[in-house]
Amino acid sequence: MAKSLEELASPFLKGLIPYTPGKPVEEVERELGITGAIKLASNENPLGPSPLALRALREALPECHRYPDGGGYYLKRGLADRLGVTPDHLILGNGCNEVLELMARCFLLPGDEVVIADPAFVIYGMLAHLQGCNKVLVPLKDWTHDLEAMAKAVTPKTKMVFIGNPNNPTGTAASPAAIASFMNTIPENVIVVIDEAYIEYVPPELVPDSLSYVRQGRRVIVLRTFSKIYGLAGLRIGYGIAPPSMIELLNRARAPFNVNALAQRAALAALDDQQHIASSRRVNELGKAYLSAELERLGLPSPPSAANFLLVDLKRDGRAVAEALLRMGVIVRPLGGRYLQSHIRVTVGTPPENERFIQALKAVLQS
Ligand SMILES: *Cc1c(COP(=O)(O)O)cnc(C)c1O
């Protein structure tokens, strides 16, 4: 008898559940027959892309019959100048998610141990699972990575440690001192992935010098993205910064044209728009202060966020509240798992979006 497709598939697919992204506005509106929904579920920039990026996109459109530059020459050079590394310290990805995938495919083997905080970005655990690794989950301490405990969780079998800084879904950042002492204790054979998807939002005193480890040739990759503050999530582009020897290995597994031409052009233009970055940061700080104060008034605390979202403890079923908010056209992210049954994650929006979220939340909590 023929085997089932599942028997033919990788055994490590067993137990994997597809990632559930935040629902797109159009889908919610279509399903509920409403208009004017707002999305505060995927930590996108509420101001949209930089006007410079939009102009670069329009200029690039007539060339879209051409394959992109598979080496990402101009963008890598632009990034390298700004970051103080060379282009051969850089790999571009179809979102930094693809760089995470390449890290898993190139380095994680069945039976390897992978140390991950809990809760952290769910993709880390999914990738480890898909490679047949053993996940070592280290609970957060005060909603922040417990880097001491994570260092202690390392064994001779540990291949990789993931650090989301700031962490998603909590928004908390590890202190630069904690990162430094973690890096001092971590054995050479362990690869450290430092995911800095939200680093442009982080107050300067909380930004660690993670690139110094890359420049020293440590087994470290720092991940950054154009999806968050740069407002280009729909184009899918992110990058990794690592020692050239690591980049060279990742390039062996990378698809030849993994980052599309429009994304490369828009990203390069967005890098130059410091004004857009500054106003995005300001809108975020003001909105976050407003949301924190309003939530506090409602008796709903959230951990201190260094990013563009808040984790909110609703003290009741988070999924039910998220569903009720959805019916009012406010899309937030329910969480769940072991620690977050009563939580949602909400992205800081524009001032009107933030007010609408608070009004809707008040209405839901009263009903
Ligand atoms: C959003 C996010 C990413 C990246 O996303 P891409 O869109 O794939 O660049 C990576 N890590 C964390 C923690 C994120 O929240």
Image (spheres, helix red, strand yellow):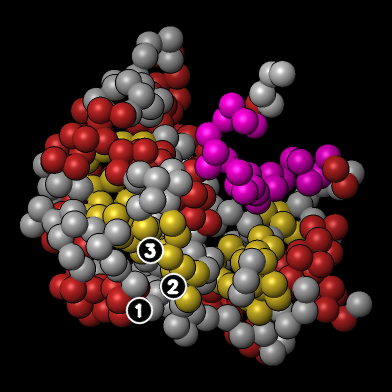
Earlier residue among tags 3 and 2: 3
Q: Check residue 139 for magenta coloring.
A: no
Which residue carries the number 1 mark? 149
Q: Which residue is mark 3?
A: 115
The percent position of residue 360, horizontal first and vertical second, equals 79, 69
Instruction: Return the residue at label 2.
Output: 138
The magenta stretch is 6-30
Q: Secondary structure at mark 1?
A: helix
- The total number of labels drawn is 3
Query: Image quadrant of residue 114?
Result: bottom left
Q: Residues within 10 Å of mark 1 (few under 14, many from 20)?
A: some
Q: Earlier in the sequence, mark 1 or mark 3?
A: 3
Instruction: Identify which residue is drawn at 88% across, 47% down.
Output: 32
Residue situated in front as seen by the camera: 53 or 91 = 91
Quadrant showing the C terminus? bottom right
The reply to whether callout 3 and callout 2 are in contact (CB within 8 Å) is: yes
Q: CA distance from mark 1 to mark 3?
A: 10 Å
Q: Is residue 34 left or right of residue 216?
A: right
Measure how far apart labels 1 and 2 are at the Cα level.
Answer: 7 Å
**Residue drawn at x 56%, y 71% as measured from the top left:** 310
Q: Is residue 332 left or right of residue 287?
A: right
- Do labels 1 and 2 touch, CB within 8 Å? yes
